[in-house]
Amino acid sequence: MKQDRRAFLKAAGLGGAALTLHGCTSAGGRTARRPAHRNGDDEAGAGDRPPNIVFILVDDLGYGDLGCYGSKDIKTPNIDAMATGGMKFTDFYVNAPVCSPTRAGFMTGRSQQRCGAETVFTPGNLKKGLPINETTLAEELKRGGYTTGIFGKWHLGYIEKYSPVNRGFDEFVGHLSGFLDYHTHVNPRFGYDWWDGLKKTEGQGYSTDLISKHSMNFVRAHKDEPFFLFVSYQAPHSPYQGPDDEPLIELKGDEVVKKKKKFTAEQRYAIYVKMVEYMDKTIGDLLQVLREEGLAENTLVMFVSDNGPSYLAGTTGGLKGGKHFLWEGGIRVPAVAYWPGKIEPGAVTGQPATILDTFPTFLALAGMKPRDNLELDGMDLRKLLLKQESLPQRALCWRYAPQGQVAVRQGKWKLIGRWNSKAKKPDFEKVKKLFDLEEDPGEKNDLAEQKPETVTKLIAAYEKWEEGIRLDHKRLERT
Ligand SMILES: [Ca+2]
């Protein structure tokens, strides 16, 4: 699906004149594309060539499951080295406590409620996916001259029009469903699910290895042009399987056969540990390729988990709840940003930031402004990343209807309320719990009665947000 330069310029709305205005530059003997819309605000010192962006998203990894986040059981020397060589976020959030909505937010830079992507896309309804009227980060970066690739989990739609290669990615090898057997690549409801672009392909090997291998090949192949690489690990989502474990979901003819294997909690956790450690090893391999190719100092690498841990495995490091909930354990995730020579080594920030911030940040690093009609919900993090400056204070809000929860954080305060699905509005009468996250990150001491003014302020902030992210019917698809 790779476009040549002329097709690229045409797709970007640039005619023949643009060929002169945005002429090619030679980098390493090959042709590099220049961004179509540089804004001249060269915060990162990008120079002629904007930085490469590598975004590593992992699946259901808990806040307490990395060495650099206090895990005593799981050894993650490579991600830890990214933290000691870059910036670790203590208060980084995702926009949802489950896979697809978080990914919809990451891909669009917008609260998932705006396009109705509030729950997980399942093979039970193949017509659903990230609405095609939404603009993706990959499409934007491609417009800016980036080569784009995703390897691993997509989970934003199953049919062809939703495929990553139709949503701004030049290359895609991986799976469309939310999870699959790590060895056979079979999803229980969607069947065999390993793709190269629009075609099913044989993907022999452990999926963590394959995702890593394709990511490294992508870096080597595109070392001479700016690239956006989305490394989307399935690990450590269920099924719990290490690299040497036997398959648990297989196809016999057209029939999906699941092996019933009972694990004790200890056995399952031991496999989970192995899965995270193995993933860490392959992340180390990818970082090594960036160094070998001389790209480390022109590449921002971010590592984030898409939501908190499943109740089956993983730990929240003392935070309440986990996957599916808006307690801190469901939405506060490990996050590290690594960029040698640009981000101060060993920086730790407690500034609340969110995965929705990556869209405007990456665009700014690419020297671009979002296209005119694009309402983004995040904030450019460059000054925090590169200069450790504080972010302007804001309210971060969440709504997760399947669990009937809403939440808002401003400064150190967090308020949890109820979502009334019938009335389609928040209800802070029946449920109203206020926590001081500085003193009480475990959300144990409800201070709502003691701090009515803070509660009122946070409710107002939530309601303002709710007004702003109303479902935009114009953007919805008619299916
Ligand atoms: Ca997930």
Image: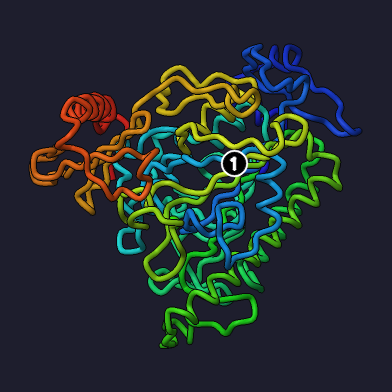
Total marks in image: 1
**Looking at the picture, how far across and down is residue 350, in whole percent?**
50, 35
Question: In the image, what residue occupies the spot 46% across and 70% down?
Answer: 238
* Residue 268 vertical placement versus 155 (above, below): below
> By what rule are the colours in the image chosen?
rainbow
Q: Image quadrant of residue 479?
A: top left
* Residue 37 vertical placement versus 303 (above, below): above
Ligand 1 appears in which quadrant?
Answer: bottom left
Q: Image quadrant of residue 468?
A: top left
Question: In the image, what residue occupies the spot 34% across and 54% down?
Answer: 320
**Looking at the picture, how far across and down is residue 113, in whole percent?**
30, 38
Residue 467 visible at all: no
Question: In the image, what residue occupies the spot 40% across and 71% down?
Answer: 312
Q: Image quadrant of residue 313?
A: bottom left
Q: Check disc 1 and report the residue beneath it.
A: 88
Bin the neighbour count of mark 1 within 10 Å (Cα to Cα): few under 14, some 14-19, many 20 and up: many
420 left or right of 107? left
